[in-house]
Amino acid sequence: MSINASSLSTAQISEALGSLGQGSVVSVVAERLLAYFTSGNIAPGTRLPAERQLAASLGVGRSAVREALAALEILGIVVVRPGSGTYLRDGISELLPRTLSWGMMLGEPRTRELVELRSGLELQAAELAAERITDDALDRMQANLDTMAASLDDLTAFVEADAAFHREIAEGSGNQVLQELLQSIRSLLRIWVDRALTDEGHAAAALKEHAEIHTALKLRDPAAVVVSMRSHMDTASRRLLLGFDASQ
Protein backbone atom coordinates (compact mmCIF):
# COMPACT_ATOMS: atom_id res chain seq x y z
CA MET A 1 0.00 0.00 0.00
CA SER A 2 1.39 3.40 -1.03
CA ILE A 3 2.27 5.89 1.69
CA ASN A 4 0.83 9.27 0.75
CA ALA A 5 1.52 11.17 3.95
CA SER A 6 3.80 14.17 3.86
CA SER A 7 6.28 12.44 6.14
CA LEU A 8 7.23 8.94 7.25
CA SER A 9 7.24 7.70 10.81
CA THR A 10 10.17 5.72 12.17
CA ALA A 11 7.92 2.71 12.63
CA GLN A 12 6.82 2.76 8.98
CA ILE A 13 10.31 2.90 7.56
CA SER A 14 11.68 0.46 10.13
CA GLU A 15 9.03 -2.11 9.17
CA ALA A 16 9.75 -1.64 5.47
CA LEU A 17 13.55 -1.71 5.65
CA GLY A 18 14.38 -4.02 8.53
CA SER A 19 17.61 -3.94 10.49
CA LEU A 20 20.83 -4.34 8.51
CA GLY A 21 23.02 -5.54 11.37
CA GLN A 22 26.24 -4.16 12.76
CA GLY A 23 28.44 -5.36 9.89
CA SER A 24 26.67 -3.35 7.21
CA VAL A 25 28.37 -0.54 5.28
CA VAL A 26 27.39 2.63 3.47
CA SER A 27 26.86 0.83 0.16
CA VAL A 28 24.37 -1.58 1.70
CA VAL A 29 22.48 1.25 3.42
CA ALA A 30 22.27 3.16 0.12
CA GLU A 31 21.14 0.08 -1.78
CA ARG A 32 18.42 -0.71 0.77
CA LEU A 33 17.17 2.89 0.83
CA LEU A 34 17.22 3.08 -2.97
CA ALA A 35 15.17 -0.09 -3.29
CA TYR A 36 12.62 1.22 -0.82
CA PHE A 37 12.41 4.69 -2.35
CA THR A 38 11.80 3.25 -5.82
CA SER A 39 9.35 0.56 -4.70
CA GLY A 40 6.31 2.73 -5.30
CA ASN A 41 5.33 2.56 -1.64
CA ILE A 42 6.30 6.15 -0.88
CA ALA A 43 4.73 9.16 -2.55
CA PRO A 44 7.06 11.73 -4.15
CA GLY A 45 7.64 14.66 -1.85
CA THR A 46 7.46 12.56 1.31
CA ARG A 47 9.73 13.81 4.10
CA LEU A 48 12.05 11.13 5.45
CA PRO A 49 12.77 10.55 9.13
CA ALA A 50 15.85 12.24 10.58
CA GLU A 51 19.25 10.58 10.18
CA ARG A 52 19.16 9.55 13.84
CA GLN A 53 15.84 7.76 13.37
CA LEU A 54 16.92 6.07 10.14
CA ALA A 55 20.14 4.89 11.78
CA ALA A 56 18.20 3.44 14.70
CA SER A 57 15.77 1.68 12.36
CA LEU A 58 18.58 0.16 10.29
CA GLY A 59 20.84 -0.67 13.21
CA VAL A 60 23.80 1.31 11.85
CA GLY A 61 25.67 4.49 12.73
CA ARG A 62 24.45 7.92 11.71
CA SER A 63 27.53 8.47 9.53
CA ALA A 64 26.57 5.52 7.31
CA VAL A 65 23.08 6.92 6.82
CA ARG A 66 24.44 10.43 6.20
CA GLU A 67 26.86 9.24 3.50
CA ALA A 68 24.24 7.02 1.87
CA LEU A 69 21.78 9.92 1.68
CA ALA A 70 24.52 12.16 0.31
CA ALA A 71 25.11 9.69 -2.53
CA LEU A 72 21.37 9.49 -3.24
CA GLU A 73 21.17 13.29 -3.26
CA ILE A 74 24.00 13.50 -5.83
CA LEU A 75 22.02 11.14 -8.08
CA GLY A 76 18.80 13.11 -7.65
CA ILE A 77 16.91 10.47 -5.67
CA VAL A 78 16.37 12.69 -2.63
CA VAL A 79 16.57 16.43 -2.06
CA VAL A 80 17.79 18.12 1.12
CA ARG A 81 16.00 21.29 2.17
CA PRO A 82 18.02 23.12 4.83
CA GLY A 83 15.99 23.68 7.96
CA SER A 84 13.24 21.38 6.76
CA GLY A 85 14.60 17.89 6.12
CA THR A 86 15.28 15.31 3.40
CA TYR A 87 12.52 14.54 0.90
CA LEU A 88 11.91 11.93 -1.77
CA ARG A 89 12.28 13.67 -5.10
CA ASP A 90 9.65 13.64 -7.85
CA GLY A 91 10.26 11.50 -10.92
CA ILE A 92 12.73 9.06 -9.36
CA SER A 93 11.21 6.15 -11.29
CA GLU A 94 12.69 7.71 -14.43
CA LEU A 95 16.13 7.68 -12.82
CA LEU A 96 16.01 4.06 -11.71
CA PRO A 97 17.13 2.32 -14.95
CA ARG A 98 20.06 4.72 -15.34
CA THR A 99 21.01 4.41 -11.68
CA LEU A 100 20.89 0.63 -11.64
CA SER A 101 22.67 0.38 -14.99
CA TRP A 102 25.69 1.96 -13.34
CA GLY A 103 25.57 -0.51 -10.45
CA MET A 104 25.06 2.30 -7.99
CA MET A 105 26.72 1.53 -4.66
CA LEU A 106 26.55 -2.24 -5.11
CA GLY A 107 29.65 -2.97 -3.11
CA GLU A 108 33.30 -3.71 -3.70
CA PRO A 109 33.29 -5.33 -7.20
CA ARG A 110 31.27 -2.52 -8.79
CA THR A 111 33.21 0.21 -7.02
CA ARG A 112 36.53 -1.20 -8.21
CA GLU A 113 35.15 -1.57 -11.75
CA LEU A 114 33.99 2.04 -11.73
CA VAL A 115 37.47 3.15 -10.63
CA GLU A 116 38.99 1.19 -13.52
CA LEU A 117 36.50 2.64 -15.99
CA ARG A 118 37.09 6.16 -14.74
CA SER A 119 40.84 5.79 -15.29
CA GLY A 120 40.37 4.66 -18.88
CA LEU A 121 37.93 7.45 -19.71
CA GLU A 122 40.14 10.11 -18.10
CA LEU A 123 43.02 8.92 -20.29
CA GLN A 124 40.88 9.11 -23.42
CA ALA A 125 39.56 12.55 -22.50
CA ALA A 126 43.08 13.86 -21.87
CA GLU A 127 44.39 12.50 -25.17
CA LEU A 128 41.58 14.18 -27.10
CA ALA A 129 41.96 17.40 -25.11
CA ALA A 130 45.64 17.60 -26.06
CA GLU A 131 44.51 18.49 -29.58
CA ARG A 132 41.21 20.27 -28.86
CA ILE A 133 41.40 22.19 -25.59
CA THR A 134 41.29 25.98 -25.81
CA ASP A 135 43.71 28.47 -24.34
CA ASP A 136 40.89 29.85 -22.17
CA ALA A 137 40.35 26.38 -20.70
CA LEU A 138 44.06 26.05 -20.01
CA ASP A 139 43.96 29.40 -18.21
CA ARG A 140 41.06 28.19 -16.06
CA MET A 141 43.00 25.02 -15.28
CA GLN A 142 45.93 27.16 -14.14
CA ALA A 143 43.54 28.99 -11.83
CA ASN A 144 42.44 25.61 -10.47
CA LEU A 145 46.09 24.71 -9.85
CA ASP A 146 46.62 28.02 -8.04
CA THR A 147 43.61 27.28 -5.82
CA MET A 148 44.92 23.80 -5.08
CA ALA A 149 48.34 25.19 -4.18
CA ALA A 150 46.73 27.66 -1.80
CA SER A 151 44.47 24.98 -0.26
CA LEU A 152 46.88 22.29 0.85
CA ASP A 153 45.58 22.72 4.38
CA ASP A 154 41.93 22.96 3.27
CA LEU A 155 41.19 19.60 1.68
CA THR A 156 37.55 20.45 0.90
CA ALA A 157 38.59 23.41 -1.24
CA PHE A 158 41.42 21.33 -2.72
CA VAL A 159 39.05 18.56 -3.83
CA GLU A 160 36.66 21.08 -5.41
CA ALA A 161 39.48 22.65 -7.44
CA ASP A 162 40.73 19.16 -8.36
CA ALA A 163 37.27 18.24 -9.70
CA ALA A 164 37.05 21.50 -11.66
CA PHE A 165 40.46 20.76 -13.23
CA HIS A 166 39.24 17.38 -14.46
CA ARG A 167 35.96 18.84 -15.74
CA GLU A 168 37.94 21.21 -17.93
CA ILE A 169 39.79 18.26 -19.46
CA ALA A 170 36.53 16.41 -20.12
CA GLU A 171 34.97 19.48 -21.72
CA GLY A 172 38.19 20.10 -23.62
CA SER A 173 37.95 16.65 -25.20
CA GLY A 174 35.11 17.95 -27.35
CA ASN A 175 33.21 14.70 -26.81
CA GLN A 176 29.90 15.31 -25.05
CA VAL A 177 29.17 11.62 -24.44
CA LEU A 178 32.59 11.09 -22.86
CA GLN A 179 32.06 14.18 -20.72
CA GLU A 180 28.69 12.94 -19.45
CA LEU A 181 30.01 9.45 -18.74
CA LEU A 182 32.83 10.86 -16.66
CA GLN A 183 30.46 13.13 -14.74
CA SER A 184 28.18 10.19 -13.92
CA ILE A 185 31.08 8.07 -12.71
CA ARG A 186 32.49 10.91 -10.62
CA SER A 187 29.09 11.34 -8.98
CA LEU A 188 28.92 7.66 -8.09
CA LEU A 189 32.44 7.72 -6.66
CA ARG A 190 32.07 11.09 -4.92
CA ILE A 191 32.16 9.73 -1.37
CA TRP A 192 35.41 7.85 -1.96
CA VAL A 193 37.00 10.71 -3.94
CA ASP A 194 36.35 13.02 -0.99
CA ARG A 195 38.13 10.53 1.29
CA ALA A 196 41.10 9.93 -1.00
CA LEU A 197 43.07 12.96 0.20
CA THR A 198 43.61 12.60 3.91
CA ASP A 199 46.55 14.91 4.56
CA GLU A 200 48.71 17.67 3.11
CA GLY A 201 51.25 15.14 1.84
CA HIS A 202 48.66 13.47 -0.38
CA ALA A 203 47.44 16.86 -1.58
CA ALA A 204 50.96 18.05 -2.43
CA ALA A 205 51.61 14.88 -4.45
CA ALA A 206 48.30 15.28 -6.28
CA LEU A 207 49.09 18.92 -7.05
CA LYS A 208 52.38 17.91 -8.67
CA GLU A 209 50.60 15.29 -10.79
CA HIS A 210 48.02 17.84 -11.98
CA ALA A 211 50.73 20.37 -12.82
CA GLU A 212 52.47 17.80 -15.04
CA ILE A 213 49.21 17.11 -16.89
CA HIS A 214 48.67 20.84 -17.41
CA THR A 215 52.19 21.30 -18.77
CA ALA A 216 51.71 18.46 -21.27
CA LEU A 217 48.37 19.91 -22.41
CA LYS A 218 49.94 23.32 -22.95
CA LEU A 219 52.54 21.65 -25.19
CA ARG A 220 49.70 20.00 -27.18
CA ASP A 221 51.59 16.70 -26.86
CA PRO A 222 49.10 13.78 -26.76
CA ALA A 223 51.76 11.21 -25.86
CA ALA A 224 53.05 13.27 -22.93
CA VAL A 225 49.50 13.96 -21.78
CA VAL A 226 48.68 10.25 -21.74
CA VAL A 227 51.84 9.45 -19.76
CA SER A 228 51.16 12.13 -17.16
CA MET A 229 47.46 11.30 -16.86
CA ARG A 230 48.17 7.56 -16.57
CA SER A 231 50.64 8.22 -13.77
CA HIS A 232 48.11 10.43 -12.00
CA MET A 233 45.23 7.97 -12.37
CA ASP A 234 47.38 5.11 -11.08
CA THR A 235 48.15 6.96 -7.85
CA ALA A 236 44.71 8.60 -7.60
CA SER A 237 43.00 5.22 -7.95
CA ARG A 238 45.18 3.73 -5.25
CA ARG A 239 44.34 6.62 -2.93
CA LEU A 240 40.65 6.34 -3.71
CA LEU A 241 40.52 2.59 -3.11
CA LEU A 242 42.40 2.97 0.16
CA GLY A 243 39.56 5.22 1.34
CA PHE A 244 37.03 2.68 0.14
CA ASP A 245 38.83 -0.28 1.78
CA ALA A 246 39.11 1.60 5.06
CA SER A 247 35.30 1.87 5.20
CA GLN A 248 34.69 -1.86 4.79
Image (cartoon, rainbow, N blue to C red):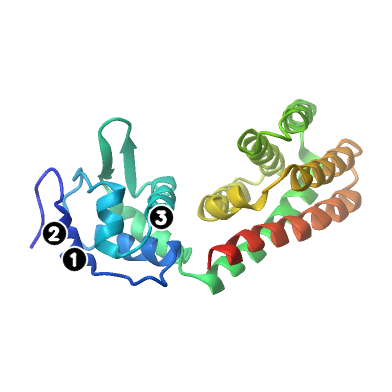
Name which residue lies at 32% across and 65% down.
Answer: 32
User: Badge 1 is on which residue?
Assistant: 16
Q: Is residue 128 left or right of residue 91?
A: right
Q: Tell me which label, 1 or 3, sits earlier in the chain.
A: 1
Q: Quadrant of residue 56?
A: bottom left
Q: Amino acid at mark 1?
A: Ala
User: Badge 3 is on which residue?
Assistant: 68
Q: Where does residue 153 sit, x and y in percent of width and height?
A: 70, 34
Mark 2 in CB contact with mark 3 (< 8 angstroms): no
Mark 1 in CB contact with mark 3 (< 8 angstroms): no
Q: Secondary structure at mark 2?
A: helix
Q: Quadrant of residue 151?
A: top right
Residue density around tag 2, few if under 14, some if 14–19, many if 20 or more, within 10 Å: few
Q: Where does residue 7 sit, x and y in percent of width and height?
A: 15, 45
Q: Amino acid at mark 3?
A: Ala
Rendered image: mark on residue 12: 2
Residue density around tag 3, few if under 14, some if 14–19, many if 20 or more, within 10 Å: many
Name which residue lies at 39% across and 50% down.
Answer: 66
Name which residue lies at 41% across and 57% down.
Answer: 64
Q: Secondary structure at mark 3?
A: helix
45 is higher (above) or lower (below) than 189 = above
Q: Quadrant of residue 121?
A: bottom right
Q: Where does residue 232 sit, x and y in percent of width and height?
A: 79, 53
Residue density around tag 1, few if under 14, some if 14–19, many if 20 or more, within 10 Å: some
Rendered image: mark on residue 27: none
